[in-house]
Amino acid sequence: MVTHDSWVTPGQLVTEGGRVTDGGWCARAGMFHSVLTSFAGAEIFGESYGTGTPGILALHGWRRDHRDFTATLTSPAGALDSIAVDLPGFGGTPAPEEVWGSARYAEALIPVLEHMQRRVVVIGHSFGGRVGVHLAAIAPERVAGLVLTGVPLFRTTPLARPPFRFRAVRQLAKKGLVSEARLERHRQRYGSADYKAATGVMRGILVTVLAEEYSDVLAKVSCPVELVWGDDDTEAPLAVAERIHEAVPNSHLVVCEGAGHLTPMTVPGELRAAIERLGP
C-alpha cells in the first residue's frame, strides 16, 4: 500500500488493496480517475458496474481499454451488473511475458468468469471479439451469449505481403548484416499504425493474432450470438459480419448506419440492446 505521496509520479499506477490507483495524484490535480479492481489473482484489472452479481463481461479492442464500454454498461436508468476488463498489455493490465494468441488470452480470462459465479454474456469489440469467440468455445458452461461488434474474424482481402525492400532488410538483419535500429526504421516506415505503435511482446502478439483463422473455433460456439456492425466499418467490413452470420446458425445481425468501427462509442445503445436480448 502506498503510504507516502512522493512515491507516486504523475500518471504512475500502483496497487492498493487489490485495486490500481495513482495514489491520489489525479484527484489533487482536479482530474477524474477511475480506480481499477483486480481479477484473476491480481493478474487482470478492470472496472465493475452495477450492484448485483455481474452477468456481463466486456472485452475491448486493440490499443483500447475498458473505458470504451462505459456508455454501454451505464445509463440514466442504471448500470448493468458487469465487468469490463483491461486485456493484458492494455490499460492497467501488464503485458504477457511471452507472445500469446487470442486463445491464450481467453484462457487467462477463465478465472474472471469463475469470479462472476454465473453464466454470463460476453461482449467483444474488435480484438476483444477474437478473444470472446475463443472464450465461448472453451467455456460453454459459463458463457450464455456472445455479442460481437467490429470483429475481423475473416479477411475480405488477402493478407498483404510486406514490401520487397522491407523483406530484404529483414533477411539481412537475421544474418546480422543490418542493425536492429535500421530494421526498426523500416518497420516504422512500412508497418501499419498498430504495428508501429506496438513494441516488444505486444508486437509479436499483434503479428500472431492477425495470422489467425477462426472458422474452426466459430463452429464450436453453441451460445446465441448477436452481431452489431457499422455499415461503414473499414477495419472489419460489413461483409465480415455477414459471413459470421452465415457461419453461426444461432446468430442475429444488426447493421448500424454510419457507426464506423468504434461502435462502443458511436452506438452504445445498440450494444446494450443486444446484451439485453441475450438476457444476462
Image: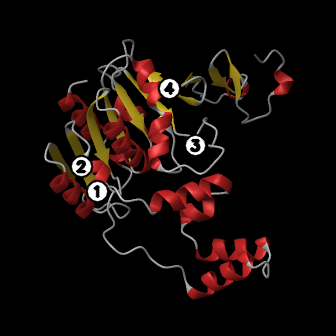
**CA gap, disc 2 and disc 4:** 31 Å
**CA gap, disc 1 and disc 4:** 32 Å
Q: Residue at x 63, y 48 (%)?
A: 98
The answer to whether marks 2 and 3 mark residues whose Cβ atoms lie closer than 8 Å is no
Q: Which mark is residue 47?
A: 4
The answer to whether marks 2 and 4 mark residues whose Cβ atoms lie closer than 8 Å is no
Residue 194: quadrant of the picture: bottom right
The answer to whether marks 1 and 2 mark residues whose Cβ atoms lie closer than 8 Å is yes
Q: Determine whether, in the image, residue 84 is placed left or right of residue 142.
A: right
> Reading the chain from its start, which is encountered first: label 2 or label 4?
4
Q: Residue at x 29, y 53 (%)?
A: 216
Identify the element where label 4 is drawn.
strand
Q: Residue at x 81, y 14 (%)?
A: 3
Percent x, y for residue 140? 29, 32
> Reading the chain from its start, which is encountered first: label 1 or label 3?
3
Identify the element where label 3 is drawn.
loop
> Residue type at mark 1?
Ser
The residue that mark 1 highlights is 215
